[in-house]
Amino acid sequence: MSSKDQNLFSKILSVCKARGFLFPSSEIYGGLNSCWDYGPLGVQLKNNLKKQWWDNMTKRSDVTGLDSSIFMHPKVWEASGHLEGFTDPLSDCKDCKHRFRLDKDTKACPQCGSKNITKSRNFNLMFKSFMGPVEEESSVVYLRPETAQGIYVNFLNVQQSMRYIIPFGIAQIGKAFRNEITPSHSVFRAREFEQMEMQFFTSEQGSEKWFEYWRSERRQQLLSLGLKETELHFKTHSKEELAHYAKKAEDIEFDFPWGRRELEGLHNRGAFDLSRHQQFSGKKLQYFCPEQNKSYLPYVIETSIGADRLFLAVLCSAYTEETVKNETRKLLKLKSHIAPVQIAVLPLSKKPALTSLCEKLYSDLQKNWFAEYDASGSIGKRYRRQDEIGTPFCATIDFETCEDNKLTVRERDSMRQERIPIESLNAFLKDNLS
Ligand code: GAP
């Protein structure tokens, strides 16, 4: 990362910390490497992103939801290939003792630059634990490294209980855990994170068409969250990069301040996952097609995105600096439907005549919007704070309000101000908050 980009990312992280989006986990104990806590505004933004994804996926007739458990039978991970193959190459620097992931371009220690590094060895990324009071081989369990396997093992449960016919999909949001060798860039690569995954079951013949369909759908959804066309890139996996079972794979990459990185993965996984679970469990997972009067293992089209990585991409895309009257104005140009605060109510002064009006307005607005009430500090400082947290509108009540029953609405990006009657604020927000 160049120093300019490092600087930009540091600024975004410092807004996150100062304004209650993201805190280092267990900070008073010095933090826990790669673990993060979402503050009040962070959890609201992340929940808004998850809700958008969930609604987009499940508010349609051919995709349904699931919430499977984090611990699964250890054989799941044998069948999926994670026990054997979910590894990263690990290397040690013999000079500074730094331990790091040996990527294909890494020739020297990323910490001290020494070329005196050990040969790589494979390191399994799954977190291991023990179920029950005895710590022995037979009680080993793993924290799931992806949510997808919970969907595959429930494929027939869902299909039969909901009487779905193929094609249909199962969507899930949930925590995943990976003992990453080099976690980086806060929640971009963390050891505990959330995935939003959808597995779409289709016939082999339909799989290419559905891959294209979901590719276009996901692109559209990411754009609707405010990510810009120019920041998104589709990278098709080459033959060498493709997993042996996969028919096709593409990464949706995003231009983070430190470079272009994977944001979401799209896969045509063939019938690999279901066939492996069928083989390892000894239970038939074939789908009976009533039209063709035959059973077969469907192909799977997967869309998989990290909620935390999306959260970071949205923040990086929205972060803007402008010069206003020789001062730097920082703002988050968040789309209003995902902003953690949509409307802030600000009394011009703390005089009871104004605060009582504001409190009433605030409690009315809370019924429909993510609203905040802020009475402390100068009005200029309060506007700056709302800009920094991405609030699309502020409603200010001043002494004139007591006479004309009007308030001032200020729009975040243009800073344009307009006086409207208090009772029309709800209608104004309905028109202007998408
Ligand atoms: N089921 C397929 C799967 O898990 P993946 O490419 O390993 O594929 C999918 O992960 C998505 O999960 C990634 O595109 C990324 O958004 C997110 N992700 C993966 N590892 C992550 C980590 N350590 N921290 C945060 N997000 C991660």
Image (cartoon, rainbow, N blue to C red):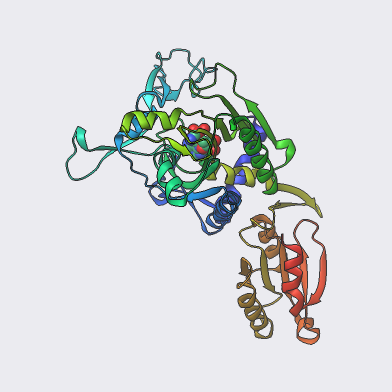
Q: Residue at x 69, y 43 (%)?
A: 220
Image position of 73 (left or right of 149) = left
Give the answer, above or below, for where 103 lies relative to 412: above
Expressed as whole percent of the image width and height from the top left, the position of residue 58 reads 56, 51
Q: Residue at x 58, y 51 (%)?
A: 61
Give the answer, above or below, for where 232 lies relative to 160: above
Q: Residue at x 67, y 71 (%)?
A: 345
- Residue 384 is at least partly visible in this image: yes
Expressed as whole percent of the image width and height from the top left, the position of residue 67 reads 43, 50
Image position of 133 (left or right of 191) = left
Q: Residue at x 46, y 32 (%)?
A: 297
Image position of 322 (left or right of 95) = right
Identify the image quadrant of the C terminus: bottom right
Report how many numbered discs are placed on residues in the image.
0
**Residue 363 quadrant:** bottom right
In the foreground, 348 or 155: 155
Expressed as whole percent of the image width and height from the top left, the position of residue 326 reads 80, 52
In the foreground, 132 or 266: 266
Image position of 384 (left or right of 122) = right
Identify the image quadrant of the N terminus: top right
- Residue 258 is at least partly visible in this image: no
